[in-house]
Amino acid sequence: MNPRYVATEWERHVYCVFHRHMEPGDVLYAEYVDDLQTFQALQRGEPPEATRLGKLLVHCGYRIVKNWYHPEGWLEGGMKLQAVKV
């Protein structure tokens, strides 16, 4: 997601539109590299679904499965939440 759309109505709209066009069981990976609020909440130990981005995804109809952030020497990929359409 473009950083200028983080925490805007446009961000909510995009994730909800994706949800409408997905099949049950499909997976969405939502990066939060530019979402300082979500990053800090996860660093404090909050569950992914309780973060700003997690709540937004749950609102759109996803179930949050996992936080994909494992600092292991730059081989772990980007920071993202894994969400599944239920």
Image: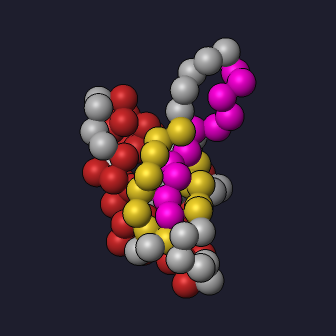
Quadrant housing residue 62? bottom left
Quadrant housing residue 4? bottom right
**In the orientation shown, which residue stands out farthest toward the bottom?**
20
Question: Can you say which quadrant of the picture contains the N terminus?
Answer: bottom right
| Residue at x-position 30% and y-position 43% | 47
Whether residue 31 can be seen here: yes
Foreground pick, 1 / 62? 62
Instruction: Verify whether residue 49 appears in magenta.
Output: no
Question: Can you say which quadrant of the picture contains the C terminus?
Answer: bottom left
Q: Residue 22's x, y, as percent?
A: 61, 78
Foreground pick, 15 / 83? 83
Is residue 76 placed above or below 8 in the rendered structure?
Answer: above
Q: Residue 26's x, y, as percent?
A: 59, 69
Q: Residue 66's x, y, as percent?
A: 46, 46
Whether residue 10 can be seen here: no
Is residue 75 left or right of 68 when viewed as pictured? right
Is residue 9 left or right of 79 when viewed as pictured? left
Residue range of the region highlighted in magenta in the rendering: 74-84
**In the orientation shown, which residue stands out farthest toward the right?**
75
Instruction: Verify whether residue 80 appears in magenta.
Output: yes
Quadrant housing residue 59? bottom left
Q: Residue 67's x, y, as percent?
A: 47, 42
| Residue at x-position 64% and y-position 37% | 78
